[in-house]
Image (spheres, grey):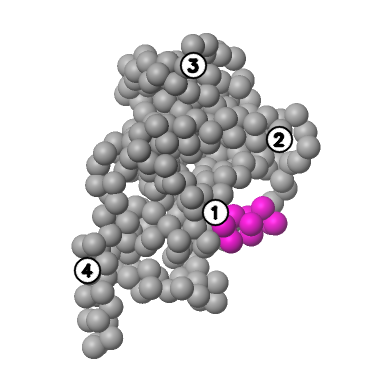
Amino acid sequence: MKLKTTISLLGVAIFMVACATNPFTGKKTMALVPNSQIFPMAFQQYDQFLAENNVVTGTAQANKIKKIGQEIATASERWLNANGYAGYLKDYQWEYNLVNDPAVNAWCMPGGKIVFYTGILPIAKNDAGIAAIMGHEVAHALANHGQQRMSAAQYQGLVAVAGNVALSKDPKAQEDFNKYYGIGSTVGVMLPFSRKHESEADRIGLTLMAMAGYDPIEGAELWKRMQQNSGGQAPPEFLSTHPSSQTRINNITAWAPEAKAEARKFGVTKFKRN
Ligand SMILES: [Zn+2]
């Protein structure tokens, strides 16, 4: 009982001091667990996922995922440096892997660990479509959305996990980590981000894809294709966590011009549409 009280008080204390600012929105966000603790856990989970799944290497498609991933990450670094956030990415270790799996899915773990499934490629359709998905996933990682999801959950009673440094030796803590980061390597769940986080990721993602030289309006086309695919045969994992509503498509269409305007500040004048 005494220990329990100590842990909850500790949780409150950490919660009170651990607010970070999201560089892209300027808003304060919760950051109960620091990146230095979260990222190593994520990297370990990511490696485990890769070991247990069929990673495609050396093909034109796999190389394309890596190339576009690097372009988007470079864009994010340029944007952060130009806006007074140099060093923001120091703990990030970007990685972009294609996994041979018919699931229509893509995700990003904290610290920049991205996976595309081959099943999403027909819907991405072209480079601009891949850039739109990549921009969105990278945006989640930059805004530390996974961390915030974990923080919120922990604050509701998972403070013990926050204090657990030897996570790999604690199956329960590991399970909680998987659950709150929503990666299906061991528990098979994929929790949706909040609508607010999705909207943020869409908006930041559009700027990143525009800065990488892709027309952000293709983001809207991508979500239209997602919508059309929802009645298809492929299991729509990505859609279950990313509902493709008309509002989303409308927002992306409205934000595309401002994303281009931002990219022009960085000298980007041509925007590829395919
Ligand atoms: Zn998302």
Label 3, on which residue? 268
Q: Mark 2 vs mark 1: which is more N-terminal?
A: 2
Q: Mark 1 highlights which residue?
A: 184
Q: With 82 as the anchor, is 166 left or right in this view? A: right
Q: If you read the primary sequence from the N terminus, does the residue marked by circle 1 or circle 3 appear first?
A: 1
For residue 76, above or below residue 122 = below
Q: Amino acid at mark 4?
A: Val
Q: Check disc 3 and give the amino acid type.
A: Val
Range drawn in magenta: 43-52
Q: CA distance from mark 3 to mark 2?
A: 26 Å
Residue 2 visible in the snapshot: yes
Q: Which mark is residue 12?
A: 4
How many residues crowd around disc 1 within 10 Å: few (fewer than 14), some, or many (20 or more)?
some
Q: Nearer the viewer, mark 3 or mark 4?
A: 3
Contact? badges 4 and 1 (CB < 8 Å): no
Label drawn at residue 62: 2
Question: Quadrant of the image for the N terminus?
Answer: bottom left
Residue ID at (43%, 57%): 35
Q: Nearer the viewer, mark 2 or mark 1?
A: 2
The residue carrying pointer 4 sits among few (fewer than 14), some (14 to 19) or many (20 or more) residues within 10 Å by Cα, namely some
**Looking at the image, is mark 3 or mark 2 nearer the viewer?**
3
Q: Within the magenta stretch, is there residue 48?
A: yes
Residue 103, quarter of picture: top right
Q: How far is the residue under mark 3 from the one under mark 4?
A: 45 Å
Q: Within the magenta stretch, is there residue 27?
A: no
Give the spatial CA distance, label 4 vs label 1.
Answer: 30 Å
Report the amino acid beneath label 1.
Gly
